[in-house]
């Protein structure tokens, strides 16, 4: 697996599982229509081991959740984390994906996702292991992708 794919999956699975455990995210929640009934938005901070993380997600709309995650957030992260390409404005590492739920939760096209990563963090990212099933009860990090980067 490419390190960029591992980074994206790791950050998103961490953020959405944290939101789920904290009661911010309901995988079977209602669909919202953006024009008639805008979906709720959530921002929160957490820790991925020793790494500070800020995340943003917009609840279900057309069976999709929009999710952005930044590690080592900037001072301006609260204001720009909801922007798709916030990159360095949000943090030293940033990724943005949609999560779908046709039958089970998954991140479509994650193999094409390329997170923004400041160069000094690539060696550290190589050392991060994928989450266990207990750490990822939503199953967002596909367990069939068994090899570490």
Image (cartoon, rainbow, N blue to C red):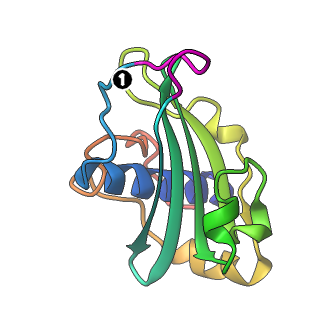
Which quadrant holds residue 118? Answer: bottom right
Q: Position of residue 40 (x, y in %)?
A: 46, 37
Is 63 above or below relative to 12?
A: above
Say left or right for 124 vs 128. Answer: right
Confirm whether residue 20 shows in the render: yes
What are the residue bounds of the magenta stretch? 31-38
The residue depicted at 43 percent of the width and 18 percent of the height is 31
Does the magenta portion include 32? yes
Say left or right for 14 vs 2. Answer: left
Query: Which quadrant is home to the C terminus?
Result: bottom right
Q: Position of residue 56 (x, y in %)?
A: 53, 52
Is 6 above or below relative to 30?
A: below
Is 145 above or below relative to 22?
A: above
Q: Nearer the viewer, residue 118 or 72?
A: 72
Which quadrant holds residue 121? Answer: bottom right
Q: Nearer the viewer, residue 104 or 96?
A: 96
Which quadrant holds residue 144? Answer: top left
Confirm whether residue 2 shows in the render: no
Residue bearing the label numbered 1: 104
């Amino acid at each position: 697996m490419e390190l960029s794919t591992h980074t994206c999956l790791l950050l998103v699975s961490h953020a959405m599982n944290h939101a789920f455990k904290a009661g911010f995210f309901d995988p079977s929640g209602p669909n919202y229509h953006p024009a008639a009934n805008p979906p709720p938005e959530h921002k929160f901070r957490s820790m991925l081991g020793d790494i500070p993380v800020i995340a943003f997600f917009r609840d279900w709309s057309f069976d999709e959740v929009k999710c952005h995650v930044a590690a080592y957030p900037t001072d301006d992260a609260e204001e720009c984390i909801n922007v798709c390409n916030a990159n360095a404005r949000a943090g030293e590492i940033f990724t943005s994906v949609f999560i779908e739920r046709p039958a089970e939760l998954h991140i479509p096209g994650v193999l094409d996702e390329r997170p923004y990563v400041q160069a000094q963090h690539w060696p550290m990212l190589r050392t991060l292991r994928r989450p266990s099933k207990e750490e990822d009860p939503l199953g967002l990090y596909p367990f069939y992708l068994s090899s570490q980067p």
